[in-house]
Image: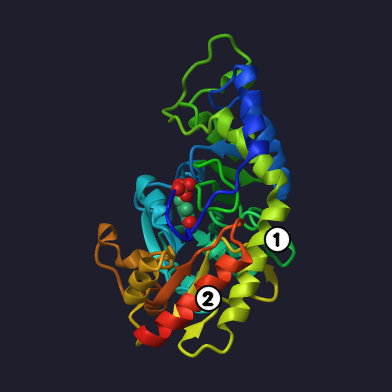
């Protein structure tokens, strides 16, 4: 057990264990089996999309998506800068070049003006990240994509249960990739999904995710032929069964996170030196993370160290991709760089009690006063 109040904690219990027992009894533990099929149907429906493919991670879903979008070496893909670098990595893995776009200071998602300014003759598409789960400006992204003949891909790693103008996260672009890592809204420890209305793309991704051949469950021929090089990016049926239960529990999990966010908002209201994260009026925030913005003069890392010493697990927000050495020297993106330096991620998960949230608020208030 981690001491104190953890940053994230999966909310799993007896119902998930019972679902795992059913998979054990069924004998099909590998991936792409009946439990995956059941989860895919439920998940496509939950995200308002026609088709879903369960994958080993969001990173593998992003990579498969770029493969079926036929991304090639020399292509440029515009990526919202403020994200876990799995987004940029997938572009590089697909052989193309990520071009990072700066973000809006209120949503932390790609700024449509920066996206448009980043378009060149080599641009083939846009990956827009739902930062901390809240979707970006998808109607604007769509207009830019249409104007320039680009595809649009949603990195929905954190946004299960979110909405934008009443549409569910996952349905906002041509393709979307989700993560079921332990810190995300629903989890099987690890896992991911690729969703789309485009049947052909999901079918091609399905073959690629199982070594380039039709999966055993849906195979028509006795001996199928390999027509292309694929991978093992399958989710196991054990994980899929856990996720089917988690998806049923999603409304309750979202409500619990929302009440934590509301309590933080109230606890930090009027506190000088901090800005609480905004929920924009035309979207529903799923609160995968709660990112408090400290004033520019404050030493965020000192605050993190002090809080951790008091048993409160907290950390930075997410990464400014353009500052990661692996992508080489890039032009400065000041908004993203500022968020990367100043964001403080507080404990956020569906199991936090009001008493724990109050302890966090009190500790943050005290440390802000001394570190400020
Ligand atoms: C967590 C995360 C990922 C990576 O998810 P995995 O399932 O670990 O591959 C990608 N993008 C964003 C925005 C994330 O937060």
Residue at (64% x, 46% y) in the render:
196
Q: Residue 88: x percent and y percent?
A: 39, 56
Q: Residue 228: x percent and y percent?
A: 44, 27
Q: Depth check: 320 or 139 in front?
A: 320
Q: Badge 2: how crowded within 10 Å, few (<14), some, or many (20+)?
A: some
Asked if residue 325 lies left or right of residue 111, the reply is: left
Asked if residue 235 lies left or right of residue 344, the reply is: right
**Residue 372 visible in this rendered orientation of the protein:** no
Q: Does residue 256 sit above or below 292 in this rendering?
A: above
Marks 2 and 1: which is nearer the front? 2
Which SS class for mark 2?
Answer: helix
Q: Residue 201: x percent and y percent?
A: 58, 40
Q: Badge 1: how crowded within 10 Å, few (<14), some, or many (20+)?
A: some
Q: Quadrant of residue 106?
A: bottom right
Q: What is the number of callouts on the image?
A: 2
> Residue 300 — which label?
none
Q: Does residue 331 sit above or below 251 in this rendering?
A: below
Q: Residue 108: x percent and y percent?
A: 50, 72
Q: Depth check: 305 or 336 in front?
A: 305
- Location of mark 2 (residue): 361
Residue at (38% x, 64% y) in the render:
319
- Location of mark 1 (residue): 255
Residue at (72% x, 44% y) in the render:
248
Of callouts 2 and 1, which one flags the residue occurring earlier in the amino acid sequence? 1
The quadrant of the rendering that contains the C terminus is bottom left
Q: Does residue 364 sit above or below 7 in this rendering?
A: below
Q: Quadrant of residue 273?
A: bottom left
The CA span between labels 2 and 1 is: 20 Å
């Amino acid at each position: 057990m981690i001491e104190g109040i953890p940053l994230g904690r999966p909310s799993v219990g007896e119902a998930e264990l019972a679902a795992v027992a059913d998979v054990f009894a069924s004998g099909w533990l590998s991936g792409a089996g009946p439990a995956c099929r059941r989860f895919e149907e439920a998940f496509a429906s939950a995200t308002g999309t026609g088709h879903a493919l369960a994958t080993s991670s969001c990173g593998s879903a992003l990579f498969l998506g770029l493969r079926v979008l036929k991304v090639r070496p020399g292509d440029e893909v515009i990526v919202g800068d403020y994200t876990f670098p799995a987004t940029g990595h997938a572009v590089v893995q697909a052989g193309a070049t990520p071009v990072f776009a700066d973000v809006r200071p209120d949503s932390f998602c790609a700024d449509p003006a920066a996206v448009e300014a980043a378009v060149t003759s080599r641009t083939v598409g846009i990956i827009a990240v739902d930062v901390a789960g809240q979707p970006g400006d998808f109607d604007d992204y769509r207009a830019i994509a249409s104007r320039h003949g680009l595809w649009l891909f949603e990195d929905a790693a954190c946004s299960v249960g979110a909405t934008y103008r009443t549409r569910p996260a996952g349905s906002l672009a041509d393709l979307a990739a989700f993560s079921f890592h332990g810190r995300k809204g629903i989890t099987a420890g690890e896992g991911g999904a690729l969703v789309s209305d485009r049947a052909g793309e999901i079918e091609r991704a399905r073959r690629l995710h199982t070594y380039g051949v039709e999966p055993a469950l849906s195979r028509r021929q006795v001996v199928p032929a390999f027509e292309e090089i694929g991978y093992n990016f399958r989710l196991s049926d054990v994980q899929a069964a856990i996720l089917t239960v988690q998806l049923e529990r999603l409304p309750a999990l979202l409500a619990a996170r929302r009440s934590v966010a509301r309590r933080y908002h109230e606890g930090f209201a009027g506190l000088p030196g901090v800005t609480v994260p905004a929920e924009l009026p035309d979207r529903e925030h799923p609160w995968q993370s709660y990112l408090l913005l400290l004033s520019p003069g404050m030493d965020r890392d000192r605050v993190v160290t002090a809080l951790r010493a008091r048993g409160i697990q907290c950390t930075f927000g997410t990464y400014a991709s353009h500052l990661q050495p692996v992508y080489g020297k890039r032009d400065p993106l000041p908004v993203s760089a500022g968020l990367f330096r100043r964001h403080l991620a507080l404990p956020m998960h569906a199991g936090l009690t009001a008493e724990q949230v109050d302890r966090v608020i009190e500790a943050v208030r005290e440390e802000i006063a001394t570190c400020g």
